[in-house]
Image: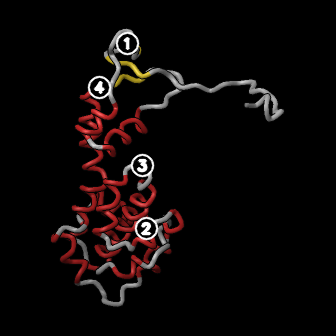
Amino acid sequence: MLKALELPFSRTILTHAHWTVNQRKMSKSVGNVVDPFEAMDIYGVDVVRFYLARVGGRFRDDVDWSTEQLDKHSDELRTLLGSLFMRITSKAIRAPVEKADENLDIKALLSDTEKAKAANAAVNNSAPWAQDPQPAATSYVSVLKTIRVCALCLQPFIPEAAAPLLDAMDVPESERTLRYAEVKAGAGASRWRV
C-alpha cells in the first residue's frame, strides 16, 4: 500500500507480543486457541474488553490467557467504579450531605484544586459520613464528578458497565460525549441532589 501511494517504507515495525495459554503460544495446530465469543458469552463483552486492554498489547512480554485472570478482572471491573459509587451514595454519607447548605455552589467547590484534593483524600482517609455537612458535600460532589468523567471516558470500551453509572447519576444522553468528560462540564452536576 505504501508503494502504491508512493510513500516511503517504514524503517521500524512495532509488533505486539504473543498471547499464550498455559505459557505456550496459541496455535491452531496445537489446538490451544481461545474462542473470544465463548469468553464473551460467559463473562460479557465488557469484561473481555477490560481484560484485553488491561493485560494485552504488550510489546516485549507474552501474555497468558486464563480463566482465573478473567475472573479477577470481572471482579475488579465490578468493584472499581460500582463500589465507589455505592459507597459515596450510601445513606451514611448522604445524611450529612443533605444537611449541607442548600445554596451549595458545586462549581465553586470544584474550582479550588486544594478543596478537590481534600475531598478525594477525605473519602479514602477519613469518614465523610462523620464530617460536618459542608466537607461531606464536597467529598460527595468531587467523587460523583470523578465517577461521571471516568464513566464517560470508559463508554467506548466498557459500555455495559459505564451506562448504568451514567443512568444512576441522571447524565442526559446529550451529555455522554467526550466533550463533557471534564470535571466542570455538563449541566448534569446541577441536578445532583447534594
Q: Earlier in the sequence, mark 2 or mark 3?
A: 2
N-terminal-most mark, 2 or 4: 4
Q: Amino acid at mark 2?
A: Ala
Residue 121 position within the rendered picture, expressed as x and y whole percent measured from the top left: 35, 60
Mark 3–mark 1 Cα distance, whole angstroms, equals: 28 Å
Quadrant for the N terminus, please. Answer: top right
Kind of residue at disc 4: Ser
First of labels 1, 2 by sequence position? 1
Q: Which residue is mark 1?
A: 24
Upstream in sequence: badge 3 or badge 4: 4
**Outermost residue toward the right in this view:** 6
Q: Are marks 3 and 1 in contact (CB under 8 Å)?
A: no
Q: Nearer the viewer, mark 2 or mark 3?
A: 3
Q: Identify the mark at residue 135; answer none if there is no mark.
A: none
Q: Earlier in the sequence, mark 1 or mark 4?
A: 1
The CA span between labels 1 and 4 is 12 Å
Residue placed under numbered mark 3 in the picture: 157
Marks 2 and 4, Cα distance to the nearest angstrom? Answer: 39 Å
Q: Which coloring applies here?
A: secondary structure
Up the image or down, 52 lies above or below 137; here it is: above
Where residue 182 appears, as percent x and y from the top left, is: 50, 66
Whole-percent x and y of residue 112?
49, 73
Discs 2, 4 touching: Cβ within 8 Å = no
- Is the residue marked by circle 2 packed among few (<14), some (14-19), or many (20+) residues within 10 Å? some
Residue indicated by mark 4: 66
The outermost residue toward the front is 4
Question: Which numbered dot is residue 116?
Answer: 2
